Image (cartoon, rainbow, N blue to C red):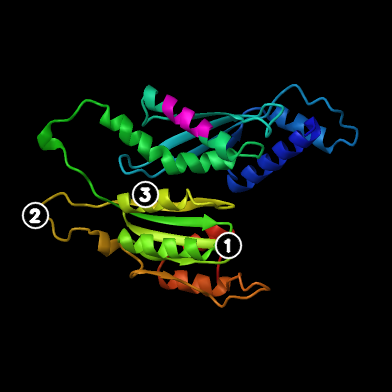
Amino acid sequence: MSYLEWAESQLAEIELLTSMFPTQEELEMTDQLALAELRDYVESSDSTDSPPPSRPQFLIRHKLDTASMERTDVILSCAYPSEYPSVLPEITVRCVGLNRVQQTQLHTDLNTYLMENCQGEVCVLSAVEWVKDNLQLFINKSLSAAPALKKESVYVQEVFSRLWIYSHHIYNKVKRKNILEWSKELGLSGFSMPGKPGIVCVEGPHSACEEFWSRVKVLTWKKIMIRHREDIPLDRQGEDSGTVESIDSLRKFTGFEEAMFDPHGNRGNHMDLGQLYQFLNEKGCCDVFQMYFGIEGR
């Protein structure tokens, strides 16, 4: 690739990130001059093969729900080398819930993931999704390394999770069978919608949802990610309190099913999104429709 092609990829990714993180609280360009120079370089009809000297840098801020902390602030600091995406970007993750050792390990594992899965492609969004999917594991390790609390003050709080998974498509019969069998094996409820795009929702104990995701994500996919997740600590403290939350009381689905919504198209691989919206609305979770498709359902 030429410097101009690299610059075009960089600008296209920044515009995508800007649309996904529209506020400055979510996405902050720390060097506006570098962005202006990059845009001018791409749009100028006489762009040479020499890139601008300054490089785009930006921060992506997230507030993530985790089992151990109510809301965890996570900041990804990103900088583009001139040859990106042929080389990896410089990404640093900052999170108050991690000690220094876990912070270092997170960076190592993230870079390994990007090298194995995203080399030669824009990957900042993939990095964001990877951090969202894996941060809890590093926080758990960080907490386990901390001095132990007195035995009488320690109890394990159970967590209910609901994962909303997006895939570019789900056609393969073996994958569809795995999704159905694994959800049943792990005691998860929810649904899967095959076709293009593919949607999977699983809900139940946090550990079971994480196990399901760990199995699914290692299969061969064109693209798969957790689009949204809900982690709800169960209120089990206080023996004299009235009702006690349970996993089953928080479920929105009964059992797990493969849902089809009037398949159409040349290959019969597209679903009626209006019917999907009605299905989600009946389950009390129509808000995720906009997260998947960027539009409000009707």
Q: Nearer the viewer, residue 244 or 275?
A: 275
Q: Secondary structure at mark 2?
A: loop
Residue in view at x 21 percent, y 25 percent: 147
Q: Position of residue 282 (x, y in %)?
A: 42, 73
- Residue reaching furthest bottom? 262
- For label 2, the residue is 240
Q: Are marks 1 and 3 in contact (CB under 8 Å)?
A: no
Q: Amino acid at mark 3?
A: Glu
| Residue 248 relative to residue 189: left or right | left
Q: Nearer the viewer, residue 282 or 138?
A: 138
Above/below status of 27 relative to 232? above
Above/below status of 141 relative to 166? above
Q: Secondary structure at mark 1?
A: loop
- For label 1, the residue is 197
Q: Amino acid at mark 2?
A: Asp
Q: Position of residue 96 (x, y in %)?
A: 39, 29
Above/below status of 211 relative to 111? below
**Which image quarter: residue 33?**
top right
Q: Amino acid at mark 1?
A: Pro
Residue in view at x 26 percent, y 31 percent: 144
Of callouts 2 and 1, which one flags the residue occurring earlier in the amino acid sequence?
Answer: 1
| Residue 245 relative to residue 163: left or right | left
Gap in angstroms between the C-alphas marked 1 and 3: 22 Å
Provide the residue span drawn in magenta.
Answer: 104-112
Can residue 24 be seen from the camera position used here? no
- For label 3, the residue is 210
Residue in view at x 37 percent, y 49 percent: 210
